[in-house]
Image (cartoon, rainbow, N blue to C red):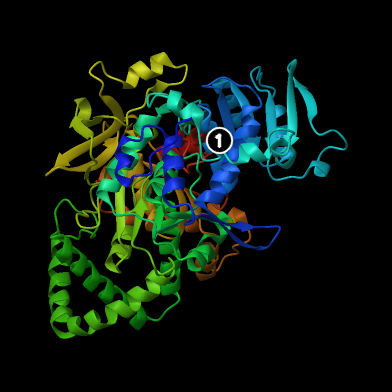
Amino acid sequence: MQTVSIKKDNLTQIETLGDLFVWRVHHTPYVEAYREFDQDLNEWVSYTWLQMADRVGRWRRALEMLNLPQGARVGILLPNSTNAVCIDQSSLALGMVPVPMHAIDNPESIAYILQDCDASVLVLSTRAQWDAIANVGHSMPELKLVVIAMEKEGEFVQNPLISPISLESSPVSIVTLDNWLHQEGASNELQQRKGLESPALSELSGDALAAIVYTSGTTGKPKGVMLTHVNVLSNVKAILALVSVDENDVFLSFLPLSHTFERTIGYYLAIAAGSCVAYVRSVAQIAEDLKLVKPTILVSVPRIYERFYAKLQEMLGRSGCLTRLIFAATQKVGWHQFCDKQKYSALSPSSQLLPSVNDQESSNHQKTSCIVDVLLKPFFQLLHPLIARKVLAHFGGNLRFAVCGGAPIPASVAQCFLSFGLPLIQGYGMTETSPVVCANNIDDNWPDTVGRTIQGVQVRIGENRELQVYGNGIMKGYWKRPQDTAAVMMEDGWLKTGDQAVIQDGRVRIIGRIKEIMVTSTGEKIAPVDVEQAIMADTLFEQAFVVGENRPFIAAFVVLNQNLWEKLAQNLKIDAGDHANLHKELVRDVILKRVQQVTKNLPSYAMPRAVWVTLDAWSIQNGLITPTLKLKRHALHAFFQHAIDEMYLSRSH
């Protein structure tokens, strides 16, 4: 029986993710590996790497008793937790293929994925989840077992240990996690002692599948991205060469583990580095858990930083004029300090971080700025650390760096946090690249780019400015979708990303999405994401969606922040509780002016000329955004079709 060498330099030779976990356990068995909140005990509980190996061993033995072949798919529909780690690692140890799914996704989407990947096992939280999935009615002939992880036996079934049901003539057994793990033979004492050994691993190739990760499906049915062990490990090793991460670091995990970004950076990278991962209690408690856990590394999509920024702006809005002036001045000092350190021009023509102004405004601004700089700059330099400390305290106060990916972050948000010393590092990647292609780092951080390529990755610019990628992280293909695979994989092995980019001095700047370019009836080409991001810079707007394909102008649909809407309604002397007031001409005019103010730096043809207002957020549940918070444009178009037609018809008269 083969075990993995514990020499640290052997990390470079490890070829499977199961070997990586075993290697980590042998190397630092008594170091804290995971931390989560136990609802039953009402306290935080920690697990060492050795304790996690013991748990994984029990899960593996229960899974092994099903006698499934290597390559069998195991569906995982769990929130971020040690249970999610256990089923993932036990599947990998037996050469099976985890299929992580978004725990908050809708039943229709989950049922489709289970059917498409031919899952043999599904592990989820509650019986109610399974009932909703089963009621969709999709045939799942390969599904043999459903494990309920967060309910006890008596909570959903009266007598039997395992309750069989029938799904389209295929029997599916349902069992609670506790009963599944304590089956006769699954918890044998002798077998428990073998928890660190993985005999199946020696038979696995690094080219074997390590996961099928389904894309969000913004424009259709989700596609299963086939990622190999080599794909993911090449990414992990390249990131470790880019940033320093070790056993002293603590990650706070809240992005879903079904997201490749979190899966690679917040999960497998932490195993490779020996860092502790703490799981948030809930999304609603992220702000509180940041202060409790005090992480040193944060991995997030822009939305989390945007929410912190919105709260900061709301707080400043309640403050006096002097406080706002002091905050702005100290932020400016911090921005110049950041730029000096990075040898980065604060007024770089390529930078979108500082708002542009017309010549007259620029002249007046520069004169005022010079006077302030000369007279008060020393004062604000002294004040900067005090204000920065208060800003960074909202993130726990211990962050060494914060990673942002998944989507572009608004320039105003990036500038604010960088100005106050939050080492915010942006990168770029996609599920199909495991995921990281390029990234900034602490010492080479140009925030209007997504940085340089990581080790082992090459990029080039193809037709229509498309960014193309080559390297060990490129997916094996889309599961059972050879035509879709051929559409993005070129004959020479390069992947077509669908994103437009430019490469300057080795740094990559993303400039748009090929498929998301709108062409107005006047022939103007506009990237809707750019307009939506600009709108979201105003904290009044929670969500934004713009239309204009084959139309004479751009129009915006916006979801308002409830608290800020109430304040605006009070100023306008109208009833905020009466939703009919949202569609009054007075309100639309005011909202449109706000939209046009924050989009004034875009080309004139990209500035919205009409607006439609709502307080009803677009959610995963109503099918208007994906589990990774991306807009489902086709669904939004269909949902607002009547309003869109009415808007353009009224403006044509």
Quadrant of res 653: top left
Residue found 43% across the figure and 52% down from its top: 28
| Residue 376 visible, this angle | yes
How many marks do you count on the picture?
A: 1
Quarter residue 297 falls in = bottom left
- Quadrant hosting residue 194: top right
Q: Which residue is drawn at 46% across and 47% down?
A: 25
**Front residue of 101 and 315:** 101
- In this rendering, would 231 be left or right of 564? left
Picture coordinates of residue 170, whole percent (x, y): 72, 17
In the image, is residue 518 above or below residue 318? above
| Residue 507 spot, x, y in % from top left | 18, 44
Front-lying residue, 570 or 518: 518
- Disc 1 marks a residue whose amino acid type is Ser
**What residue is pinned by disc 1?**
90
Front one among 414 and 175: 175
Q: What element carries label 1?
A: helix
Q: Is residue 550 left or right of residue 252?
A: left
* Mark 1, other Cα within 10 Å: few <14 / some 14–19 / many ≥20: many
| x, y percent for residue 78 | 60, 42
In the rendered view, does 345 fall on the left or right side of 566?
left
Image x and y of residue 48, in percent: 52, 54
| Rendered residue at 16%/76% (across/down) | 368
Which residue sits furthest right?
Answer: 159
Looking at the image, can residue 597 be seen? no
